[in-house]
C-alpha cells in the first residue's frame, strides 16, 4: 500500500500538471504603453484578435500611456507573475529609454522575462511636397547649402524618432540641422505638414496614410529592402546613404518571476498566431513585418543588442537629456 507521503506527492504533481494544462485560466491582458492609434497599439490589437483562439482565452488590450513607458511598465512589474498580464514593449520604451535616461523607474532587462517578438516597423523620412525636392540626394544638398536654416521634428526628446534624426544627421553630415521635440508623432508630423520643420522620421505605420494621400513626401525608408506598401520609395542605401537602417519594434514581456513553462506556452501561442497568413497580411498592411520564430532567449538577446546599439548612437550624437 503506498505511503501517505507518496500519495501526497503524486497528488501534488497531478495538481501542478493540471494547473499547467489549464493556463490561462482567465483572459489575458496586453498592456500598451501608448495612447490608442499608434503603431504599437495597432500591432497589439491585431495580435490580440489572432491570439485569443490560439490560447483559448480572450485577449484584452489596455492602453496605459505616460512617462515614456514607465506607467505601463510599472503596472506589469507590479502585477501577479502568473502569465496573464503582458507588456507590449517597443523600441522607445525598452530600447531608447535605457540608452538616454539617467534614471528609470524600471529595468528593461532585469524586471522582465522576454516572451517573443511581435514584429518590426521601418521608419521613413518624410518632408512636405512644398519643400521642393523629390529625392533624398537633392534634399541633403539643400540642407547642406542652407546651414542653420532648417530643423527636424521628433516625437519628443529621447524618442526613437529623435535618435533616428540624429543618426541621419551624422551619416548625412548635417550638423547644423536643429532638433525640435514635439509631444508625440502626430504633432511632429503636423509640423512637417505646416512647414514648421523640414522633415521628420516616423514609423511607416503612422506615416503611410499621409504618404498615400500625398500630403507628405517619403524620401527614404529605413528597412534593408523596399516595403510592399511603398514600392516606389527607396531605402536609404538605394537613395545614396548607406549604413542607415531605422526601425522600431514590438515584443511581448512578462513580469520577471513568471514561470518558465507559462512563458513558453505564451510564446508558442503568439508565434503560432504570428505565423498565420491573415495576421501577417494585416500587420504588413499597417507597415509591420511579423516575426514568428523568436524564442524567449532570442528575444532577450535582441533586446540587449538594441539597447547597446541605441547607446552607441547617443554617444556618437552626444545626446544629453535632463533628469
Image (tube, rainbow, N blue to C red):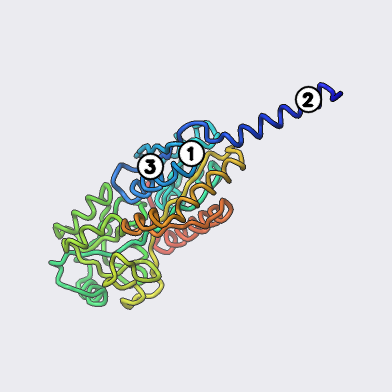
Label 3, on which residue? Answer: 33
- Disc 2 secondary structure class: helix
Query: What residue is shown at x 36% (from left), y 52% (from top)?
Result: 158
* Residue 203 visible at all: no
Within 10 Å of disc 2 (Cα), the crowding (few <14, some 14-19, many 20+) is few
Q: Left or right: 258 with respect to 158? A: right
Spatial CA span between label 1 and label 2: 32 Å
Which of these two is toward me, 257 or 127? 257
Calculate the distance from the C-alpha at mark 2 to the C-alpha at mark 3.
47 Å
Q: Give the quarter of the figure containing the C terminus.
A: top left
- Of the two numbered discs 2 and 3 in the rendering, the one whose residue sits closer to the viewer: 2
- The image quadrant where one finds the N terminus is top right
Judge the density around disc 1: few (<14), some (14-19), many (≥20) Cα neighbours within 10 Å. Answer: some
User: In the rendered image, which residue does mark 2 sit on?
Assistant: 7
The residue located at (38%, 46%) in the rendering is: 44
Q: Residues within 10 Å of mark 3 (few under 14, many from 20)?
A: many
Mark closest to the chain's N terminus, 1 or 3: 3
Residue 25 in picture, x, y percent from top left:
52, 31
Q: What residue is at 49 percent from the left and 51 percent from the top?
A: 272
User: Disc 2 or 3, which lies upstream in sequence?
Assistant: 2
Q: Position of residue 194 (x, y in %)?
A: 14, 57
Q: Residue at x 42, y 51 (%)?
A: 250
Tell which residue pokes out farthest to the front in this image.
Answer: 1
| Percent of width and height locating residue 42 | 33, 48
In what element is the residue under mark 3?
loop
Residue farthest to the top?
4
Locate residue 70: give its quadrant: top left
Q: Which residue is mark 1?
A: 56
Q: Nearer the viewer, residue 140 or 59?
A: 59
Q: Nearer the viewer, residue 129 or 280?
A: 280
Left or right of 187 in this view: 32? right
Amino acid at each position: 500500500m503506498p505511503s501517505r507521503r507518496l500519495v501526497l506527492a503524486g497528488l501534488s504533481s497531478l495538481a501542478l500538471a493540471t494547473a499547467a494544462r489549464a493556463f490561462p485560466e482567465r483572459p489575458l491582458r496586453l498592456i500598451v504603453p501608448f495612447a490608442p492609434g499608434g503603431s504599437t497599439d495597432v500591432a497589439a490589437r491585431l495580435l490580440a484578435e489572432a491570439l485569443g483562439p490560439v490560447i483559448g482565452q480572450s485577449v484584452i488590450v489596455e492602453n496605459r500611456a505616460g512617462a515614456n513607458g514607465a506607467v505601463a511598465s510599472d503596472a506589469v512589474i507590479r502585477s501577479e507573475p502568473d502569465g496573464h498580464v503582458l507588456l507590449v514593449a517597443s523600441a522607445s520604451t525598452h530600447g531608447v529609454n535605457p540608452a538616454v535616461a539617467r534614471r528609470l523607474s524600471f529595468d528593461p532587462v532585469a524586471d522582465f522575462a522576454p516572451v517573443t517578438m511581435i514584429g518590426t516597423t521601418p521608419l521613413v523620412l518624410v518632408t512636405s511636397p512644398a519643400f521642393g525636392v523629390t529625392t533624398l540626394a537633392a534634399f541633403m544638398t539643400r540642407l547642406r547649402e542652407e546651414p542653420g536654416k532648417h530643423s527636424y521634428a521628433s516625437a519628443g526628446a529621447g524618442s526613437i524618432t529623435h535618435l533616428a534624426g540624429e543618426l541621419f544627421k551624422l551619416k548625412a553630415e548635417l550638423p547644423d540641422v536643429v532638433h525640435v521635440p514635439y509631444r508625440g508623432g502626430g504633432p511632429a508630423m503636423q509640423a512637417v505638414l505646416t512647414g514648421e520643420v523640414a522633415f521628420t522620421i516616423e514609423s511607416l505605420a503612422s506615416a503611410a496614410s499621409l504618404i498615400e494621400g500625398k500630403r507628405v513626401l517619403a524620401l527614404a525608408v529605413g528597412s534593408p529592402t523596399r516595403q510592399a506598401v511603398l514600392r516606389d520609395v527607396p531605402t536609404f542605401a538605394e537613395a545614396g546613404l548607406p549604413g542607415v537602417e531605422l526601425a522600431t519594434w514590438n515584443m511581448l514581456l512578462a513580469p520577471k518571476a513568471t514561470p518558465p513553462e507559462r512563458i513558453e506556452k505564451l510564446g508558442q501561442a503568439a508565434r503560432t498566431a504570428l505565423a498565420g497568413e491573415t495576421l501577417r497580411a494585416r500587420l504588413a498592411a499597417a507597415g509591420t513585418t511579423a516575426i514568428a520564430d523568436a524564442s524567449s532567449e532570442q528575444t532577450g538577446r535582441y533586446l540587449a543588442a538594441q539597447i547597446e546599439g541605441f547607446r552607441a548612437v547617443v554617444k556618437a550624437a552626444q545626446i544629453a537629456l535632463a533628469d
